[in-house]
Amino acid sequence: MEEIIRVAVDGMGGDNAPASTVKGAIEALKASAKLEIWLLGTQDALTAELAKYTYDTNRLHVVPTTEVIEMAEPPVMAIRKKKDSSIVRGMLMVKNGECDAFVSAGSTGAVLVGGQVLVGRIKGVERPPLAPLIPTTKGPALLLDCGANVDARSSHLVQFAKMGSIYMEHVLGVKNPRVGIVNIGAEEEKGNALVKETFPLLKECEGINFIGSVEAREIPLGGADVIVCEAFTGNVIIKTIEGVGKAMLSMIKQGLMATLLSKIGALFVKSSLKEAMKPYDLSEYGGAPLLGLTGLVVKTHGSSSYVEIRNSIMQCITFSEQKINEKIREQIGIQQAD
């Protein structure tokens, strides 16, 4: 009998909720018989959306909540005060073993705070990083951290490299993933104080394939499989990639629509262009896991469509089946014992 993966979904999180969260949950159920989903949120809003679909009621359950954490709320205060919000209730379901994972497109701050305070860190993990997959010409790469730890220490980055390597190898199937630290040049002596302190530690770290520095321009070209940095730099990188991608797509569309001849040509290249651009659609990769917690927490974009919600739920299956948390616990445990 196949193991069932139980996923709690924040039905009220994100700009397009609850329409996108409900549809994403329904589509995930259709895609895999291994899933059971607990949809948390305002009863009336979720029921109204669910009425639009036909689905297996034995595998999708509504958990009514009475509070919603808004995007602009102070995260710590919101987690403490809004005990009956979908974010707090969903994370407690993971903490208590009722669900294997929690997915949210809601407040990033609340998800990060709740993940550490409510779900809790694996013993030995100093700082859980937010780790999204990003597109490159050689396939997806893992960027960590991109939002959880703006002021990280060298020991944190070393752990990021270890956890990122485990994720890429066992979730993405990348054997001996290449680990690079974000820097302003290839030379070891370059970089700020954090990079200079971390570089030799990564160089000496057993169990990872450290290839040295990776410059920002090398990231989209597949310069590394695991890209390590503190959250300020990581957040700038991922948002730059998103912005450049949107700008390029807009420019291509303008070019194709510029003249009658180009419009005719667009008819012939449309399908090929769409297929070529598919790997650069961030929604294809799902959300960003908060690695190093005792349970899986996945944060998706606030503007997520149902596609990204579906894919974020689907990635929980591989994460759970590959026992990523157990592998992280084993690796970090070895590190602490040494």
Image (cartoon, rainbow, N blue to C red):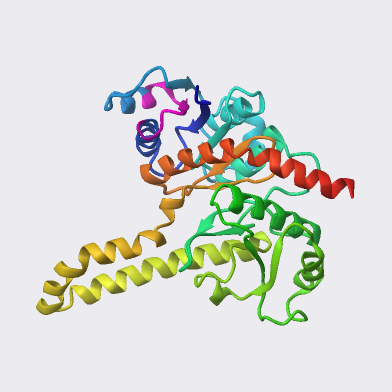
Give x and y (percent) for residue 303. Answer: 42, 49
Residue 338 in percent (x, y) is at 89, 50
Residue 170 lies within the magenta run: no
Residue 105: x and y, percent? 48, 42
Residue 67 appears in view: no
Count of all numbered marks drawn on residues in the image:
0
Which residue is at the front of the view, 148 or 69?
Answer: 148
Q: Position of residue 241 (x, y in %)?
A: 48, 67
In this view of the protein, which residue sits in the foreground, 303 or 276?
A: 276
**Magenta stretch: includes residue 34:** yes
Taking 82 as reference, is 126 above or below it? below
Q: Quadrant of residue 21?
A: top left
- Residue at 44%, 21% (x, y): give it: 62
Residue 248 at least partly seen:
yes
Give whichever of 258, 337 is nearer the camera: 337
Q: Which residues are magenta?
A: 30-46
Q: Residue at x 40, y 60 (%)?
A: 279
Residue 73: which quarter of the image? top right
| Residue placed furthest toward the top | 58
Q: Tell which residue pokes out farthest to the right in this image.
A: 338
Which residue is pictured at 52% across the width and 27% down the height?
Answer: 6
Give residue 32's quadrant in the image. top left
Relative to residue 263, is residue 179 depicted above or below? above
